[in-house]
Image (cartoon, grey):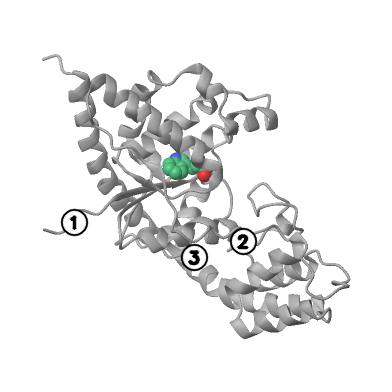
Amino acid sequence: MEKKKDIVLSGIRPTGFVHLGNYFGAISNWARMQDEFNCYYCLVDWHSLTTHPDTRELKRSVVRLMAELIGSGLDPKRCVLYIQSDVPEIAELYLYLNMLAYQGELEKTATFKDKVRQNPNNINAGLLTYPVLQSADILIHQAVKVPVGKDQEQHIEMTRNFAERFNHRYGNVFPLPYAFNYGDELIKIMSLDGSGKMSKSENQMNTLYLADDDEMIRKKIMKAKTDSGPSSPNSVKPNYIDGLFTLMKIVSAPDTVDKFETDFNHCTIRYGDMKKQLAEDMIKFVSPIREKISVLEKDEKYMAMVMEEGATKARSSAKATLQLVKDAMGLKYY
Ligand code: TRP
């Protein structure tokens, strides 16, 4: 008998353009999982309301992100790609899980504390229970593998706790999910000034987006932080230089990388030349993806079809789980 494929779920918020950090740190891994596992990928618009209550741009952001995910290699025929608010069953499970989540543990979640600090004027209950909604995203498909970065591991641990509490109180419904990544370390893409990870909230000039045109890519890379070069052979690279090498390893030919590595080690490296080369190789990498996205985004009919088909598949799985949940809880009165 064929072994049943593990169920995978991950989510991404529609709050800004996809950048290389998202692409290499997450989406390319999601794409890699498509055939090996039974994958659900969710565009979590409800989660974005916890920090972005203004919905005027939401439709564009959702369609754009959907196009970016498909353009980056998620194939709606090989995974279930859907929008969270199309699956009301998630909200119902969220309600049940909320009764199993304690105020104390929610208040001490690292991401909650960060967001309170960043935005003291909008500490809403949705923000506090963000990890509960995320747990509902995962448990609604009985997923076990959750491909996420380090910053999300605490949320997945909370998901396991909620699932265990449910199973213990009402009966075994949920397998316990865990953060999954392929053995090799997740590639960390540094911002172009070396100050941290490339991220949505960063200065846009230090972040490379799939939407950037060729000129913009050149401009950003040529402005990337460098220095006057190493003064002794085989030095340790400063962060910002290491970040440029990481990008080069991803998009350039191996002998190109080798050449600049050797130059660096011999203290003969010319960062201007390196950046020029990197910019051209980056353009070769990004421009076909960008063009694909722009074609998809304009094809309203295709996009609508993908979203509807994704919603149908996601709901059918969600309904089945919710029925198990309600049966276990005894929520049936006539
Ligand atoms: N909290 C995740 C993030 O900020 C997004 C997310 C929502 C998610 N629901 C999820 C990730 C479920 C994995 C599984 O990146």
- Residue name at image x 68 percent, y 76 percent: 278
Residue 242 drawn above or below residue 13 = below
Query: Of label 1 and label 2, which has the lower sequence position?
Result: 1
Q: Are marks 3 and 2 in contact (CB under 8 Å)?
A: no
Q: Residue furthest top?
A: 333
Measured in 3D between alpha carbons, the distance from the residue under mark 1 to the one under mark 2, in whole angstroms, is 39 Å
Any atom of ligand 1 within 8 Å of the CB at mark 1?
no
- Residue name at image x 56 percent, y 22 percent: 107
Q: Is residue 138 visible?
A: yes
Judge from the rendering whether residue 6 lies leftward or rightward of residue 126; answer left or right.
Answer: left
Residue 196 drawn above or below residue 89 = below
Kindly identify the amino acid type of the residue bearing the numbered disc 3: Ile
Q: Secondary structure at mark 3?
A: helix
Query: Residue 219: x percent and y percent?
Result: 75, 69
Q: Quadrant of residue 217?
A: bottom right
Kindly identify the amino acid type of the residue bearing the numbered disc 2: Tyr
- Residue name at image x 39 percent, y 57 percent: 303
Judge from the rendering whether residue 77 lies leftward or rightward of residue 250; answer left or right.
Answer: left
Image disc number at residue 209: 2
Residue designated by label 1? 3
Judge from the rendering whether residue 60 lies leftward or rightward of residue 116; answer left or right.
Answer: left
Q: Secondary structure at mark 1?
A: loop
Q: Quadrant of residue 171?
A: top left
Query: Residue 305: x percent and y percent?
Result: 32, 56
Report the mark closest to the observer, 1 or 2.
Answer: 1
Query: Of label 3 and label 2, which has the lower sequence position?
Result: 2
Kindly identify the amino acid type of the residue bearing the numbered disc 1: Lys
Judge from the rendering whether residue 90 lies leftward or rightward of residue 230; answer left or right.
Answer: left
Any atom of ligand 1 within 8 Å of the CB at mark 2?
no
Image disc number at residue 293: 3
